[in-house]
Image: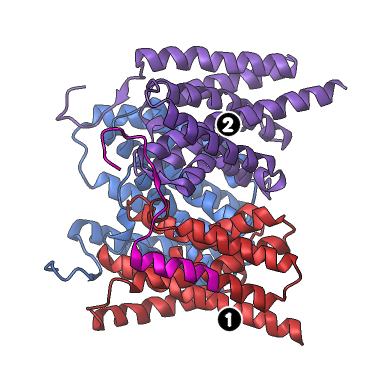
Chain colours: A blue, B red, C purple
Amino acid sequence: MQTTFIDNLIYFTDLLGTIAFAFSGVLVAGRLRMDVIGVLVLAAVTAIGGGTIRDLLIGATPVFWIKDSHYLLIIALTAIVGMGVARVYTKMPWYILPILDAIGLAIFIVIGAQKALSYGTNGVIAVIMGCITGVAGGVIRDVLASEIPMVLRKEVYVTAGILSGSIYVFLLDFGTGHIAAMFVSMLSLLLVRIPAIFLHLSLPAFNLNKDEHQ
Amino acid sequence: MQTTFIDNLIYFTDLLGTIAFAFSGVLVAGRLRMDVIGVLVLAAVTAIGGGTIRDLLIGATPVFWIKDSHYLLIIALTAIVGMGVARVYTKMPWYILPILDAIGLAIFIVIGAQKALSYGTNGVIAVIMGCITGVAGGVIRDVLASEIPMVLRKEVYVTAGILSGSIYVFLLDFGTGHIAAMFVSMLSLLLVRIPAIFLHLSLPAFNLNKDEHQ
Amino acid sequence: MQTTFIDNLIYFTDLLGTIAFAFSGVLVAGRLRMDVIGVLVLAAVTAIGGGTIRDLLIGATPVFWIKDSHYLLIIALTAIVGMGVARVYTKMPWYILPILDAIGLAIFIVIGAQKALSYGTNGVIAVIMGCITGVAGGVIRDVLASEIPMVLRKEVYVTAGILSGSIYVFLLDFGTGHIAAMFVSMLSLLLVRIPAIFLHLSLPAFNLNKDEHQ
């Protein structure tokens, strides 16, 4: 049936986002010289942190990765393969990490908004839940690495998330099919984020430090 | 009816605390040179972080700001207006931030204790939930800003919270009316905190570093 | 009855782990020169942080220390007594803190795995919940102290946790009695951790920084 196909597509997309984020966690763990377990933990936290916070906030407990062990399995595989890949391709270009992040973000925003809607939230909350699903994993990763989370300072990151989440919710509301809404939303995020990554675009900063030039 | 009036008063007070904390988040975001979205996120985290943790711990999910969108709306308005105000009044005195904090704290302790009691906790847990509601938002804000949370080191902060939360719970227990108990509790917090802010009062530190003079 | 005896033994062991972790929090608080309330907060966060996250993830709300006030009472007593002890024995050897940690870890892994199983999770999730129960309190403590959590970098810490959690779950699965499974699991953790503490054993680091010698 159509529904089953859509469900499978969403599930497959979700796992793809999990892989992208887990691999980004592996790359950060490598910079911090963590051991194998540290790599696994950072990969997992990055990949499922956002969805976990979403599930806690909307009251969907036990959280998704307790109900479905495939997520943890895929994260473990990604971490193992990822460590090998990162060792072999030591000259990995700098833009791999932000692009993995953008792919994960594009996917998780849609997945997160969808789950929130299925729990009966309104559209604004669904967009916020999408952004939390997409962004929070990276924030926890940065906090564990004792850094100010990049997303709070960097190139149109959350802005792009709000935009693509809103596009998704609006399209669904206008009666667009699930697959089309997902596709357009994810495309819009990549179209904003990828140029921003290469051109280092930022929103103007709100700066109260008078002693600095902006 | 009387109940409705009290409920409205509590709700209005809660929104006032939300504004105070959101504005304190705006001021910190300004120091960290965040973009507009960063300001919104920090304002929101400061204003609803504590209540969110309280709701998760007592099992009140979905959390309050998912059920009632007014909180997010008010935070967004405060962030927008707050950025304007902070730009115009660039010579804002240093004590604005701690006083906003004290007002938010006074309100949220009462609100948090009240919600815990309405979920059937005992008085000790209600005081702790009040303190978490009042304090945790600021802690998350400081962790995101990669600082040791001020509340763990500063002038009689949590102490004042425990005191005013206990006063509230005791007064209710002795049969005092809701409004009187709220008013006395909030007043007691401000009477402790505001002198502490201006006089830089601290509890004696517990110091295990032998190489420092205390 | 036998069941009651086992339940009591588990409860008593749990409280013992709470004391060990609370005291480790007191020692860290002393290094950070916190006031009395800061010490209480850090003791509490270290001792109940892991179990709280476990309860949130599996949907066991209100969390355990809201349902049973003995935990907070014991933490408060430990903090008060611990501050006195730490002041008197100022020449406390460096290994006291990691050994307290190892004892708390050994106990909380078993307790956490057990609770997860009683909520119907599979064995893999039970091991993970055991590790979260044992490790997360220390992670929050380190984040509050603005440090990269030691467990992500140090001597076979989480590895030992996964090992002892797995032993516990496997033994139960093979029909071993509760007490024997608990005892063997806790012993295995101490047998791995305590030599690791004194010999500074680490897993090989995964290091992507090419400019450093490993």
Q: Which residues are magenta?
A: B187-214
Give the residue drawn at x 46%, y 17%: C193
Q: Are discs 2 and 1 located on one and the same chain?
A: no
Residue nearest the observer in this picture, A31 or A148: A148
- What subunit carries mark 1? B
Residue B12 got which mark? 1
Give the residue drawn at x 72%, y 60%: B119
Residue A170 is at least partly visible in this image: no
Spatial CA distance of label 2 from label 1 is 42 Å
Residue C19 got which mark? 2
Give the residue drawn at x 62%, y 52%: B57
| Amino acid at pointer 2 | Ile
Residue nearest the observer in this picture, C208 or C92: C92
Q: Quadrant of the N terminus of chain B?
A: bottom right
Q: Tag 2's secondary structure?
A: helix
- Decide if residue A214 is on the left or right side of residue C25: left
Does residue A83 belong to the magenta stretch?
A: no
| Amino acid at pointer 1 | Phe
Q: Residue furthest left?
A: A213
Q: Give percent across and percent down for residue A56.
A: 58, 53
Q: Tag 1's secondary structure?
A: helix
**Where is A70 relative to A194, above or below?**
above
Give the residue drawn at x 49%, y 59%: B135
Q: Give percent across and percent down for residue A67.
A: 64, 42
Q: Give percent across and percent down for residue A105.
A: 40, 54
